[in-house]
């Protein structure tokens, strides 16, 4: 997870409200997240608030993320906020698959200062030169039984 510097606007946000659910402030922060703030940093911000992340309901391989809500409405609220992030562009660019039971696969792009996408060297490419999230998408399908 990326450490947020003290001058990052999200650094002072609480990690979940007292009842364990993301606060409206946190959900709005997700919705308002800018491209300049970094989409990988957005995912770090969400992961810090994701219930059961440490129990396998949040997996990452390179640019590919598999999120499972585990039926937790706080996680479902954060999925809704991610769908609206950066005016819906985040979801339009990053969404790869959804499987019944609240399982999502995202290919989270990173952008350089020139505005072009940047890839990690370890991220496998598919036959068309795109990122392969097939392993995570297949695993998500297996969870949806």
Image (cartoon, rainbow, N blue to C red):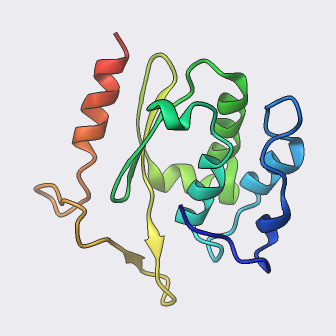
Residue furthest front in the image: 54
Q: Is residue 89 visible?
A: no
Residue 124's x, y, as percent?
A: 19, 59
Residue at 48% in and 30% down? 55
Q: Is residue 95 visible?
A: yes
Relative side of 8 to 53, left or right: right
Vertical order, 143 against 20 (above or below) = above
Residue at 33% in and 59% down? 62
Report the front residue among 94 and 17.
17
Residue at 86% in and 41% down? 23
Residue 5's x, y, as percent?
A: 71, 77
Examine the image and state in which quarter residue 123 appears: bottom left
Vertical order, 65 against 102 (above or below) = below
Vertical order, 5 against 108 (above or below) = below
Counting every numbered tag in the picture gives 0
Relative side of 109 to 129, left or right: right
Quadrant in the picture for the C terminus: top left
Residue furthest top in the image: 145
Examine the image and state in which quarter residue 141 appears: top left
Residue at 79% in and 80% down? 7
Relative side of 92 to 23, left or right: left
Residue furthest bottom in the image: 114
Relative side of 101 to 73, left or right: left
Residue 10's x, y, as percent?
A: 78, 65
Residue 137's x, y, as percent?
A: 30, 35
């Amino acid at each position: 997870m990326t450490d947020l510097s003290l001058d990052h606007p999200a650094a002072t946000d609480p990690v979940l409200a007292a009842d364990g659910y993301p606060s409206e402030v946190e959900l709005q922060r997700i919705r308002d997240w800018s491209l300049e703030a970094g989409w990988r940093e957005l995912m770090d911000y969400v992961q810090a608030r994701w219930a059961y992340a440490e129990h396998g309901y949040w997996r990452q391989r390179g640019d590919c993320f598999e999120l499972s809500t585990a039926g937790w409405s706080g996680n479902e609220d954060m999925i809704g906020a991610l769908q609206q992030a950066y005016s819906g562009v985040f979801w339009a660019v990053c969404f790869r698959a959804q499987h019944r039971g609240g399982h999502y696969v995202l290919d989270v792009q990173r952008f350089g200062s020139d505005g072009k996408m940047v890839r990690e060297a370890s991220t496998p490419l598919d036959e068309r030169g795109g990122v392969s999230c097939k392993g995570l998408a297949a695993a998500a399908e297996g969870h949806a039984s």
